[in-house]
Image (spheres, rainbow, N blue to C red):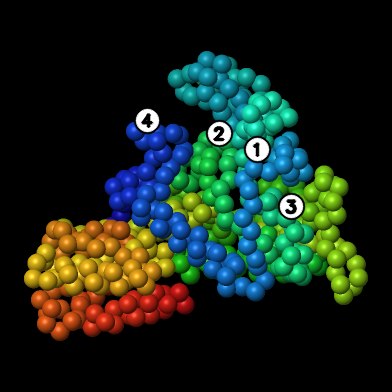
């Protein structure tokens, strides 16, 4: 079914609200611009996305360890990183309608771009994107601290702590998932561009001669990760940054982009940051940040290859890509074809009717699934067709129905979300079957 792209995005926004994936923040007060809350299904989806990333980047690797650094850091960190002086957008204000615009997005800096306004614009001013706050009871400049605009710096300042305590030798990586804050001038596109967001970043420290090899490695590995979790390959592409797009310290950078209804947009950047960050922190802190290589008995500053992904952007891409409308007329169904590992709920337990011992058998199966850490849902209201439809729309990969035959021979019907195939299994074998299906989906 062909859908207009704007309609598609608004359909997904309203489905997200109706089914409890994503709500507007502080909605009863009219909402807060660009802030969103993940509801019961959304929080499961996003956790599963972060878990999938952590498995691929940390758990299943011998050369990457994790870190959880604090959001508030010493203000000097942001001097060293360049955020205090360089992390800003050039802005102009309209003197008439008071609206603010990014100067580099305007063709004409003489007058307001709004057709009905045309007011005079102010001089271009730099607008720093970091959120500022105060530490302690006194609100003066010596107490100023910043909400981190990226998680990466927490990794760089801990480079030697982690390397020495874990006795690591380059090439190795340090990974972190956490919230970051940027006072974006123009947030938008639902959860795509927000001022508070969650990052999944990994800094991979390599000998200076191996940076290009590892840059190529992570570029391929990160693109593959999105495909492994079910994003259609023709909705993904790699886009190399042009020379003039590169941050001044970066030798190369490539974006993994996804074809959102609002166009190709970045999900993740993979950058060769060279030895810039470690050397900056060495200079600003006065502490040596070089690695001592036991074999060559010499110090060097490792180069850094950084895959930096957005947890909210990835979650939105998985949600958008999963959305399907199938069939016609009364056979039409909305189905979220999530990868089973990402699906918020794995199994719905559905007694056919609310009597004859079916709910009791259903409860027992439900309990058994939960005891095995399989996120499940129990529902004995409405017709079975309605209940299947609700689960399709929530992206639940398996429905389990208890009927008259179940009471006689202790079997249940398993219905698969995507194929709608149905088959009977012994209820005692259900947990094992679901676990096997989940394992197989991970290959
Ligand atoms: Zn104006």
On the image, which quarter does residue 26 sit in? Answer: top left
| Distance in Å between CA atoms under marks 3 and 1 | 16 Å
Is the C-beta separation of discs 3 and 1 under 8 Å? no
| Distance in Å between CA atoms under marks 2 and 3 | 29 Å
Which element carries disc 3, helix, strand or loop? helix
Is the C-beta separation of discs 4 and 1 under 8 Å? no
Q: Kindly identify which numbered label has been placed on residue 157.
A: 3
Q: Is residue 40 left or right of residue 407?
A: right
Who comes first in sequence, dot 4 or dot 2?
4
Q: At 50% from the left edge and 18% from the top edge, which residue is drawn?
A: 97
Viewer-side label of 2, 3: 3
Viewer-side label of 4, 2: 4
Q: Is residue 196 left or right of residue 62?
A: left
Q: Nearer the viewer, residue 441 or 284?
A: 284
Is residue 128 something that shows in the picture? no
Who comes first in sequence, dot 3 or dot 4?
4
Please count the marks in the image: 4
| Distance in Å between CA atoms under marks 4 and 1 | 27 Å
Q: Nearer the viewer, residue 355 or 214?
A: 355
- As displayed, is residue 113 above or below residue 32? above
Q: At 65% from the left edge and 26% from the top edge, which residue is drawn?
A: 139
Residue bearing mark 4: 29
Residue bearing mark 1: 146
Residue furthest to the left: 356
On the image, which quarter does residue 426 sit in? Answer: bottom left
| Distance in Å between CA atoms under marks 4 and 2 | 22 Å
| Distance in Å between CA atoms under marks 2 and 1 | 17 Å
x and y, in percent, of residue 59 in the image? 57, 70
Q: Kindly identify which numbered label has been placed on residue 185.
A: 2
Q: Kindly identify which numbered label has been placed on residue 428.
A: none
x and y, in percent, of residue 361 in the image? 18, 73
Which element carries disc 2, helix, strand or loop? loop
């Amino acid at each position: 079914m062909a859908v207009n792209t704007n309609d598609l995005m608004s359909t997904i926004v309203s489905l997200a609200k109706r089914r409890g994936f994503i709500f507007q923040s502080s909605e009863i007060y009219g909402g807060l611009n660009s802030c969103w809350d993940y509801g019961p299904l959304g929080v499961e989806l996003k956790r599963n996305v972060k878990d999938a990333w952590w498995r691929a980047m940390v758990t299943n690797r011998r050369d990457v360890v994790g870190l959880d650094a604090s959001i508030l850091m010493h203000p000097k960190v942001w001097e060293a990183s360049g955020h205090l002086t360089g992390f800003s957008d050039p802005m102009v204000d309209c003197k008439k309608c008071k609206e603010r615009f990014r100067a580099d997005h305007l063709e004409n800096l003489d007058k307001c771009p709004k057709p009905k306004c045309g007011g005079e614009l102010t001089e271009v001013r730099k607008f720093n994107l970091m959120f500022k706050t105060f530490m302690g009871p006194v609100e003066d400049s010596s107490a100023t601290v910043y909400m981190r605009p990226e998680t990466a710096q927490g990794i760089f300042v801990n480079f030697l702590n982690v390397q020495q305590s874990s006795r690591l030798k380059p090439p190795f990586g340090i990974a972190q998932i956490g919230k970051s804050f940027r006072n974006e001038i123009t947030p938008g596109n639902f959860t795509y561009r927000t001022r508070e967001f969650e990052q999944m970043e990994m800094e991979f420290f390599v000998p200076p001669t191996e940076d290009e090899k590892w840059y190529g490695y992570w570029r391929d590995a990160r693109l593959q990760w999105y495909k492994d979790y079910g994003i259609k390959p023709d909705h993904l592409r790699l886009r190399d940054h042009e020379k003039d797009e590169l941050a001044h310290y970066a030798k190369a950078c490539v974006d993994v982009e996804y074809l959102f209804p609002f166009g190709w947009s970045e999900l993740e950047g993979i950058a060769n940051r060279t030895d810039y960050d470690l050397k900056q922190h060495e200079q600003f802190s006065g502490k040596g940040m070089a690695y001592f290589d036991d074999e060559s008995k010499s110090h060097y500053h490792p180069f850094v290859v950084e895959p930096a992904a957005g947890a909210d952007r990835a979650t939105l891409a998985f949600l958008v890509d999963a959305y399907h409308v199938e069939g016609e007329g009364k056979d039409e169904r909305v189905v979220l074809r999530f990868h089973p590992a990402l699906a918020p709920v794995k199994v719905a337990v559905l007694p056919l009717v609310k009597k004859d011992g079916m709910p009791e058998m259903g409860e027992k199966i439900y309990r058994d699934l939960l005891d095995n850490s399989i996120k499940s849902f129990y529902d004995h209201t409405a017709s079975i067709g309605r209940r299947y439809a609700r689960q399709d729309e929530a992206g639940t990969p398996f429905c389990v129905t208890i009927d008259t035959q179940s009471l006689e021979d202790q079997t249940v019907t398993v219905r698969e979300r995507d194929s709608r195939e149905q088959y009977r299994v012994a209820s005692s074998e259900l947990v094992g079957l679901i676990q096997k299906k989940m394992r197989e989906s991970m290959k």
